Image (spheres, grey):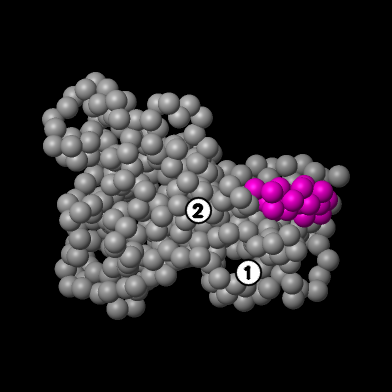
């Protein structure tokens, strides 16, 4: 039997769930208060330079899930792209993630993988057996010198709080390599959608049974739904009655230049006396177009606390917030006609591939449940 389904948010979570339910024969209304699709993955051509710009900061697609990779390739052509990041520390350029080249260059050595592993182990705080905070994880991970150079200052700027207040899980996502591999991600499937993420999301959501309303607030829609999938902030849904969960937002300072500004897509600036976290040069996210683009556009990123009217980017998940979050999660778990999804709905830092994988799983379960 056909059900009327509401989906709040036209990012990846909402688009995938809407598509899967529409293909199962349900009528879906997707609502988003912004004037565009794709949420924070929104991309468009810069009018002055013709460069495909990630308006809310860079997004690089990578996954180890065959299902997710096949799914996104069903709706877009993906171009080869290997993400490589550099760091400007004290006016010198280093390779990230921390690898054998980084270690040798930073310490002025020419160590072998075995020697470097032993060297880092001699500096790491192995006495911290069960790291709880980012700081403890970093000290156990790489020791004080590399932590201070590459992690501590960048983390303080990015999250606006001491690494001692952040959970260790944030750092557990970052690799440490004892070879010269500077591919930022380990996943076997990596690439960029040729026409950008907005076109990809538009293709996913394009189905006769899926209606999209932009500049539309869920709170203003006077319609009953059999079930609602909500990808907005979980604390907002409950009118912040347990308090506001912490988020970070980003400000971008753009410049246009002739030629090539920095020769790569991203250079991090971990030094604490540099106010921005990184410089992104977006034409390098589409290397197949670089030769045809004589101009360039760069963005300096500044991270700060998210105010009431700002766009939330990253859930902070401070250790002190866990009680508040648990209260919201318990209420969400008791809902029978509402499912919270996505980064904001679950208050978790989720990469795009994990977001899509979870959305597919949630949609699979919903399709089965709605058959009755």
Q: Which residue is more in the foreground, 39 or 321?
A: 321
Q: Where residue 133 appears, x then y in whole percent?
A: 50, 41
Q: Secondary structure at mark 1?
A: strand
Residue 37, image x, y percentages: 54, 67
Quadrant hosting residue 300: bottom left
Residue 67 visible, this orientation: yes
Q: Which residues are magenta?
A: 322-341
Q: Residue at x 71, y 70 (%)?
A: 218
Circle number at residue 32: 1
- Horizontally, residue 347 falls left or right of residue 47, namely right
Instruction: Locate the C terminus and report the quarter of the image it occupies.
Output: top right
Q: Which residue is found at the position 32% from the left and 73% from the top?
A: 254
Please give left or right for residue 201 compared with residue 85 in the image.
Answer: right
Q: Residues under labels 1 and 2: Cα distance?
A: 21 Å
Considering only vertical position in the picture, is 311 above or below 269? Answer: below
Quarter assignment of residue 288 = bottom left
> Does 114 appear above or below 320?
above
Q: Nearer the viewer, residue 344 or 77?
A: 344
- Taking the spot 38% from the left edge, 70% from the top edge, the residue there is 252
Q: Is residue 332 magenta?
A: yes
**Front one among 231 and 319:** 319
Residue 269 spot, x, y in % from top left: 29, 57
How crowded is the residue under tag 2: few (<14 C-alpha within 10 Å), some, or many (20+)? some
Is there any visible trace of residue 171 in the rendered image? no
Which numbered marker is on residue 75?
2
Locate residue 206, reporting x and y percent. 59, 62
Determine the residue located farthest toward the right in the rendered image.
372
Mark in front: 1 vs 2? 1
């Amino acid at each position: 039997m056909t059900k009327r389904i509401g989906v709040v948010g036209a990012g990846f979570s909402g688009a995938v769930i809407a598509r899967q339910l529409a293909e199962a024969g349900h009528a879906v209304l997707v609502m988003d208060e912004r004037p565009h699709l794709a949420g924070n993955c929104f991309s468009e051509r810069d009018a002055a330079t013709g460069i495909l710009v990630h308006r809310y900061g860079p997004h690089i697609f990578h996954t180890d899930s065959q299902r997710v990779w096949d799914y996104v390739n069903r709706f877009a052509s993906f171009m080869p792209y290997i993400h490589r990041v550099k760091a400007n520390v004290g006016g010198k350029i280093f390779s990230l993630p921390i690898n054998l080249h980084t270690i040798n260059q930073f310490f002025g050595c020419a160590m072998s993988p075995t020697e470097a592993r032993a060297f880092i182990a001699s500096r790491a705080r192995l006495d911290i057996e069960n790291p709880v905070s980012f700081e403890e994880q970093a000290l156990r991970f790489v020791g004080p010198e590399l932590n201070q150079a590459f992690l501590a200052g960048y983390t303080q700027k990015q999250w606006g709080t001491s690494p001692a207040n952040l959970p260790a899980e944030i750092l557990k996502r970052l690799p440490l390599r004892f070879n010269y591999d500077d591919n930022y991600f380990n996943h076997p499937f990596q690439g960029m959608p040729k026409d950008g993420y907005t076109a990809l999301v538009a293709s996913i959501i394009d189905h006769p049974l899926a209606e999209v309303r932009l500049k539309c607030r869920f709170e203003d829609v006077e319609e009953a739904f059999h079930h609602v999938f909500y990808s907005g902030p979980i604390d907002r849904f409950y009118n912040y009655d347990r308090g506001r969960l912490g988020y970070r937002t980003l400000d971008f300072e753009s410049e246009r230049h002739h030629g090539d500004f920095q020769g790569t897509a991203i250079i991090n600036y971990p030094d604490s006396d540099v106010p921005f976290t990184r410089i992104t040069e977006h034409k390098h996210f589409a290397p197949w177009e670089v030769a045809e683009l004589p101009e360039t556009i760069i963005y300096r990123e500044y991270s700060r606390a998210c105010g009431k009217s700002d766009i939330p980017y990253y859930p902070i998940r401070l250790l002190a917030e866990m009680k508040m979050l648990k209260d919201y999660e318990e209420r969400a778990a008791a809902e029978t006609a509402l499912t919270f999804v996505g980064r904001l709905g679950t208050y978790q830092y989720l990469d795009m591939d994990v977001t899509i994988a979870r959305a597919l799983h949630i949609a699979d379960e919903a399709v089965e449940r709605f058959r009755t």
